[in-house]
Image (spheres, rainbow, N blue to C red):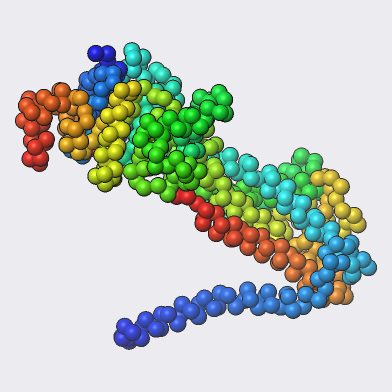
Amino acid sequence: MVNKIKVENLSCYYNEKCVLESLNIDVVQNEILSVIGPANSGKTTFLRTLNRMNDLDITYSRKGDVYLDDNNIFDMKMEDLRKRVGMLFAMPIPLPMSIYENIIYAPKRLGLITRKSYQDTIVERALKDASLWNEVKDRLNSSAMRMSGGQQQRLCIARILAVNPEVILFDEPCSGLDPVSTVKVEESMLELKQKYTIVLVTNNVKQASRVSDRTAFFLTGKLVEIDKTAKLFVSPKEKTTEDYITGRFG
Amino acid sequence: MIKLNPKLSQKFSYLLLCVATILAIVPVVVIIFIIIKNGASVISWEFLTSMPKNGMCGGGILPAIVGTLSIVLCAVLITLPIGVCAAIYLNEYAKDNLLTRIVKLAIVNLAGVPSVVYGLFGLGVFVMFLKLGVSIIAGALTLSIMELPVIITTARGALSSVPYSFREASLSLGVSRWQTIRHVVLPNALPGILTGAILSIARISGETAPILFTAAAFYVPHLPHSPLDQVMALPYHLFIISTQIPNMPKNIIYGTALVLLMMVLTMSCVAIVARIYFRKRRKW
Ligand SMILES: Nc1ncnc2c1ncn2[C@@H]1O[C@H](COP(=O)(O)OP(=O)(O)O)[C@@H](O)[C@H]1O
Ligand SMILES: [Mg+2]
């Protein structure tokens, strides 16, 4: 077991108000770690700290360290970090361009395309890995805004894959999707685990139990419990964890 | 107080609103009608493309048209890049601190300064201090300064109409802030920026005070050769032939007004059509 990400004593604040308190958590290479917990327990803040999306928010501040392969992410250049740690948001956000351009956008900007002839290969591979290729291969040049929600979300996954990251962060990726699209996104996550390390924040406890190797339970900014998913769902150590996963919370 | 029944008061307010609207439109329609009625007869290819003759009582108004177009185009070429850059800085980079707020407030208030003040400023700074003389470039710079706040404001509006989530999506892929602005924000804000620019061309074409002391000449017998030449300009020319020259044929005055009016209206229409076109094509 290799630790891909090490979080040491991380605390996060908005306007000096603490929303995440002395968090210590490791993410193992090639696992799916899911993070569950009620709304406002700091899950999104945790994810947005891991790829420093929150650094643009002036009300946000933090203490503690996060290591990616033993490099402190707060010493890295933000662009380099985000290239290695991709993020999928709750609502699908395709850019207002064609499907093809959406995928090739980041590789182009990051200078990953050495020869123009590679473009098609990159697009095809990314779409295949996100299990979207068969649905869109005949309309790569139509606007991404005209796809269904589930397709848009998988397009966003493909877009992340095209820059070839090491870690992918999912923030409630299925909260706006119907059950069929949800299954498809979950399938592609299981597929992606082979190559990538995944942190999945989800408000759907069942989803965590279906796809993840380990599960962490957050409550009001604190990590209550983290364990193998099979174990946590069968015999949680903490009473609050049990209440939450059995739906008796509140 | 008299208590009207709901139906009646509904009718009454409707009537009131209609009357107000008509009152607002009538003067514009009347002005346009009078100008067309009196001026249309002189409009011809000849009138638009020849020099004035007989002490401006005959011939055409070509130098005034060319003069106005060159001042206005120069002004836009100066304002647009500066205005868009300033808008990008204010909208995308500037931290929300006291200084930024003062700058934003200043920009809003600058848009309300009377245009004659800009004219005098241009006279002092560009014509005299920088020794540009009364010239196209001095007039264009003066108009630029006057139009800058407007361009910045419309450009900022266009930039902030691009959803914030697009920026986040791009940044989260490791794309830098500038590239995100350059390749996602700007292309989507461009239609708004351009329509704003066209509207401000229309607006400054008719301005007289800022060019009065900085660019416009009473009469120039040739077309401009360089940006340092004085030129005739439509609004100023109109003022001169209406007030300074006795026995000026009335139809030439109205014809000149009509040309200026058409120039401004055409550009406004282009802006409106462009806006509709881009809105239809917009993908979000
Ligand atoms: N941008 C922000 N500014 C201020 N407070 C925030 C911001 N984002 C989140 N919060 C607060 O931080 C806490 C944790 O939020 P979040 O991380 O979004 O939790 P979760 O994703 O688990 O719902 C909440 O109390 C929320 O109100
Ligand atoms: Mg959240």
- Residue A58 seen anywhere in this rendered image of the structure: no
Q: Residue at x 63, y 41 (%)?
A: B82
Please state the total of marks drawn on the protein image. 0
Image height of A148 relative to B271, above or below: above
Viewport quadrant of the N terminus of chain A: top left
Viewport quadrant of the C terminus of chain A: top left
- Residue B44 seen anywhere in this rendered image of the structure: yes
Which corner quadrant of the image does residue B26 belong to? bottom right
Image height of A155 relative to B32, above or below: above
Image height of A243 relative to B59, above or below: above
Q: Residue at x 46, y 35 (%)?
A: A103
Which corner quadrant of the image does residue A222 belong to? top left
Residue B32 percent coordinates (x, y): 68, 74
Pick out the residue farthest to the right. B54
- Observer-nearest residue: B111 or B177? B177
Task: Name the side, left or right, on which B59 lies relative to B152.
Answer: right
Q: Residue at x 18, y 27 (%)?
A: A215
Residue B5 percent coordinates (x, y): 31, 86
Residue B134 percent coordinates (x, y): 81, 49
Task: Name the side, left or right, on which B218 lies relative to B37.
Answer: right
- Observer-nearest residue: A89 or B230? A89
Residue A145 percent coordinates (x, y): 43, 47
Q: Residue at x 42, y 31 (%)?
A: A126
Image height of B265 relative to A91, above or below: below
Task: Name the side, left or right, on which A200 lies relative to B19.
Answer: left
